[in-house]
Image (cartoon, rainbow, N blue to C red):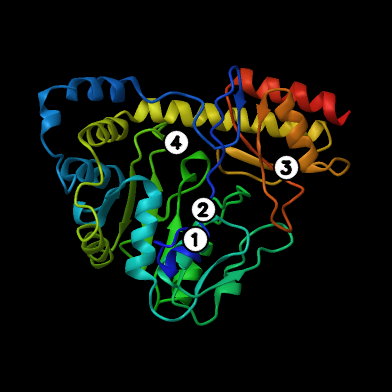
Amino acid sequence: MSKFWSPFVKDLVPYVPGEQPKLARLVKLNTNENPYGPSPKVLEAIRAELDDSLRLYPDPNGERLKQAIADYYGVQAGQVFLGNGSDEVLAHVFHGLFQHGRPLLFPDISYSFYPVYCGLYGIPFETVALDAQFRINVADYDRPNGGIIFPNPNAPTGCLLPLAAIRRLLEANTESVVVVDEAYVDFGGESAISLVDQYPNLLVTQTLSKSRSLAGLRVGLAVGNAELIEALERIKNSFNSYPLDRLALVGAVAAFEDQDYFEQTCQAVIASREQLVSELQDLGFEVLPSAANFIFARHPRHDAAQLAAALREQGVIVRHFKQERINQFLRITIGTAEQNMALQEALTGLVQ
């Protein structure tokens, strides 16, 4: 701790991202990256942008990308916000839409960045317990609040809340913003973006890191009522007017334009997920229902931390959380067929 730190900094508890190991020949199933590369059209667009234009600033408003997203979802470009990954979008959401003095509500088992942002921006919060099956019960959110946020599918559980339940939540909380964090929705869910024109308090965030295989470009977005988007734009333009570089902008546009590749890779991940679930269940694992590109599993006879350590010794890395209620689960990213087979073979030797 430095004497030059402000009192504010010393009390922060930062988010800890998933490990990015540098070991050779590693089966890396711990950070929910897509096992398939980006669309070839994305790579072509990025290569075409690698010229003298890099000396120029990018479009600060990302107009072409906003229009591509608006066209894709059937909304207006003025309903779209862009940021440097969905984490930056969420940071602006917390700063611009949740600072109302009343507690923000989110699940007790959820994305661990949420309490970090609350600490960063001084937002009071209350966690709402998932039920015994690790699902969100929207009736539990019927209490005074300054906003509600949850991932859908939830992370790290992978469980999906249907749109009908989201409607009930919105109709019971008309005086605060409800944010649906859809980082994984393309692997088995239905986007709540279809509801934004009916509910002015709804904001939906997404990322291109997962289903569009662009974690390395850092592109996030939000879609909602134009007044909500204006608040985020005011925050952004008071912080960093150029959050997306020229390569990210053209690559993201190409990703939205290549619908065939997107659907092909999503379906491949879904098929691999269902096969892996079946294989792990045959090994005695309990696997929560997942609509994401990962599964959440535990074994009744084997400690999860020990399993994770033993897998690592065999060159397979998965994510283990120490949080109470889920410390016996492993979160396992869906990999390629070869990666999933390596995991299944390693686990077979460990649990049988």
Whether residue 220 sits left or right of residue 227 in the image: it is: right
Query: Real-space Cα distance between discs 1 and 3?
Result: 26 Å
Q: Are marks 4 and 2 in contact (CB under 8 Å)?
A: no
What residue do we see at 54% from left, 30% from top? 269
Q: Which residue is mark 2?
A: 15
Q: For residue 116, which numbered disc appears in the image?
A: 1
Q: Is residue 260 above or below residue 240?
A: above
Q: For residue 281, which numbered disc appears in the image?
A: none
Q: Is residue 79 visible?
A: yes
Q: Amino acid at mark 1?
A: Val
Q: Are marks 1 and 4 in contact (CB under 8 Å)?
A: no
Label 4: few (<14), some or many (≥20) within 10 Å? many
Mark 3 residue element: strand
Whether residue 81 sits left or right of residue 53 in the image: it is: right
Which one is in front in this view, the residue at disc 3 or the one at disc 2? 2
Label 3: few (<14), some or many (≥20) within 10 Å? many
Mark 4 residue element: loop
Which one is in front in this view, the residue at disc 1 or the one at disc 4? 1
Q: Which residue is mark 3?
A: 297
Mark 1 or mark 4: which comes first in sequence?
Answer: 1
Mark 1 or mark 2: which comes first in sequence?
Answer: 2
Q: Amino acid at mark 3?
A: Ala
Q: Quadrant of residue 331?
A: top right
Q: Position of residue 119 (x, y in %)?
A: 48, 67
Q: Are marks 1 and 3 in contact (CB under 8 Å)?
A: no
Q: Which residue is mark 4?
A: 211
Q: Position of residue 227 (x, y in %)?
A: 24, 67
